[in-house]
Image (cartoon, helix red, strand yellow):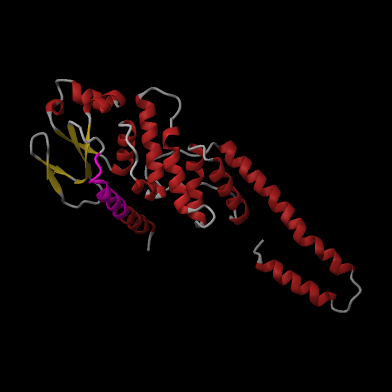
Amino acid sequence: MDTDAAELMVEQILKIRHISILARLEGIPIAADGDLFINLYTTRYVGNSTFPSALNNKPIEGKILSTVKVRRQVLAENFDFFKSMLSRNQFGERSQGTIDIHCDYPLAAQLWFRLYHDGPLPEVFSETPVEEVWNVIHWGGYLQAQHNSDQIDLSKLWPWFDKVLERYDPEKMDIDTTRMFLFPCYAFDHAEGFAEITKRLAYEMASHIQEKNPSSYFHGHLDHHIIGALNAARGSLRGNLIRGLFDPVSSFLNANCECKEKSLFSYCEALRGTEI
């Protein structure tokens, strides 16, 4: 299977997982007293699918993944995009009860919408895939730009991220997944998770520690100084381990027993098995 086909398969699997979570969120309104419905639709991998526009009933290429009920005022106060759309006369959506918004990652959008409506996050959000965690951070960056802020305030999402990380379990996840969680643990200031993940990468990665970005467009990453420090610590650890493993060789060489050659050979065979 070539790289493009593999990436497409991963995208399709993630899409199925997202749709499953979104379906369970449909019965949990963001704002029961809301005055606006938003159709979040995608144009990715939808073939020739279309749906009627909420504005003029004309066909729109894409597929609605989620419909949410929100309060206009909340969106206008927190998103310049919605403030313009819902308050200026030149936009037809101003007087609409339902609007269509192109959004390839509605799960991340829903999480932020719920956060700004000050409602509790449904437990199903703890099943958020690690790939979508990156998209949540991307939405945080989008909000940062909207408010001309220098920092992404992810503190309100700390309890949510803690549940996501706990479900994955840093002690049991594979190395690729561990690499995917490296930046999110740093972004969410999750000291315990960051410590466990960096420890595993230091001990278990055969090469230099590298983070892995599973998202398709988000370019966030750890500062190169942090990666450099992690690899420096890993190099020091590796050196100490190697010295510890090869120190016994001197004991074999200095031994007087007749089996020392055979014992040394067996020890070297065992060392080779460590793949150091």
Seen from the viewer's position, the closer of residues 4 and 190 is 190
Q: Residue furthest right?
A: 256
Please state the total of marks drawn on the protein image: 0
Magenta span contains residue 23? yes
User: Which image quadrant: the N terminus?
Assistant: bottom left
Q: Residue furthest bottom?
A: 258
Measuring from the top left, give residue 195's x and y in whole percent: 58, 45
Q: Residue at x 12, y 26 (%)?
A: 95
User: Which image quadrant: the C terminus?
Assistant: bottom right
Measuring from the top left, give residue 163's x and y in whole percent: 44, 46
Measuring from the top left, give residue 190's x and y in whole percent: 52, 40
Q: Which residues are magenta?
A: 15-29
Residue 117 lies, with reference to residue 182, above or below; the image says above
59 to the left or right of 167:
left
Q: In the figure, residue 58 lies in which quadrant? A: top left
Seen from the viewer's position, the closer of residues 167 and 105 is 167
Q: Residue at x 66, y 65 (%)?
A: 274
Q: Residue at x 40, y 44 (%)?
A: 133
Magenta span contains residue 16? yes
Measuring from the top left, give residue 113's x and y in whole percent: 30, 35
210 to the left or right of 218:
right
Seen from the viewer's position, the closer of residues 3 and 118 is 118
Residue 211 lies, with reference to residue 247, above or below; the image says above
Q: Main secondary structure of the magenta part?
A: helix
271 to the left or right of 24:
right
Seen from the viewer's position, the closer of residues 216 and 196 is 196
Residue 152 lies, with reference to residue 61, above or below; the image says above
